[in-house]
Image (tube, rainbow, N blue to C red):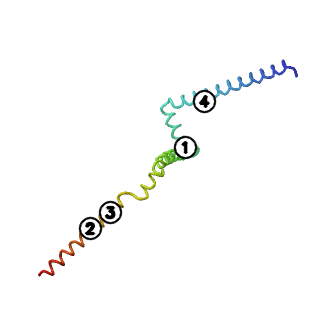
């Protein structure tokens, strides 16, 4: 095969692809136009929409779209949660999370309450021995 034969073959393939694309676009335009025509008439559009609502294919497609949307939202939420959690799980913050200040305060408060109780008990002992 010579280069001219190869060039002609490539040109023929390109021409066939253009023709196929044009045909596909024409069919798509006809379908879209027919759909708009059906939906523009009030009575016909009600019939078409009710039939679409009763169609199993449309229901299954709707359920699949809903699942896909839920999956995408779940993945996005998990990604956001992971990003937020990484800031809290750094070495410095990890020790703070494991031993929060509230527990320390509660421990200190319990110690102070025990001291006050023992002080009151000693005071009552003194008062009771005096009488």
Q: How many marks?
A: 4
Q: Which mark is in front, 4 or 3?
A: 3
Whichever of callouts 2 and 4 sits on the residue coming sooner in the sequence is: 4
**Disc number for residue 2:** none
Instruction: Give residue 126's position: percent from left, percent from top.
Output: 16, 77
Q: Looking at the image, which residue sits at the far left?
A: 131
Whichever of callouts 4 and 3 sits on the residue coming sooner in the sequence is: 4
Q: Is residue 67 above or below residue 24?
A: below
What is the C-alpha distance between the residues marked 2 and 3?
10 Å
Q: Which mark is in front, 2 or 1?
A: 2
Instruction: Determine which residue is flagged by label 2.
Output: 113
Q: Which mark is in front, 1 or 3?
A: 3
Q: Are marks 2 and 3 in contact (CB under 8 Å)?
A: no
Q: Is residue 54 visible?
A: no
Instruction: Determine which residue is flagged by label 3.
Output: 106
Instruction: Determine which residue is flagged by label 1.
Output: 65
Whichever of callouts 4 and 1 sits on the residue coming sooner in the sequence is: 4
């Amino acid at each position: 095969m010579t280069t001219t034969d190869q060039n002609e073959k490539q040109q023929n393939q390109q021409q066939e692809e253009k023709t196929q694309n044009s045909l596909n676009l024409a069919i798509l335009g006809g379908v879209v136009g027919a759909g708009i025509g059906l939906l523009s008439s009030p009575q016909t559009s009600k019939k078409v929409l009710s039939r679409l609502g009763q169609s199993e294919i449309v229901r299954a497609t709707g359920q699949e779209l809903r699942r896909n949307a839920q999956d995408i939202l779940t993945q996005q939420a998990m990604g956001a949660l992971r990003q937020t959690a990484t800031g809290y799980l750094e070495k410095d913050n990890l020790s703070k999370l494991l031993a929060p200040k509230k527990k320390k305060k509660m421990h200190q408060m319990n110690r102070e309450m025990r001291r006050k109780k023992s002080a009151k008990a000693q005071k009552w002992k003194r008062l009771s021995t005096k009488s």
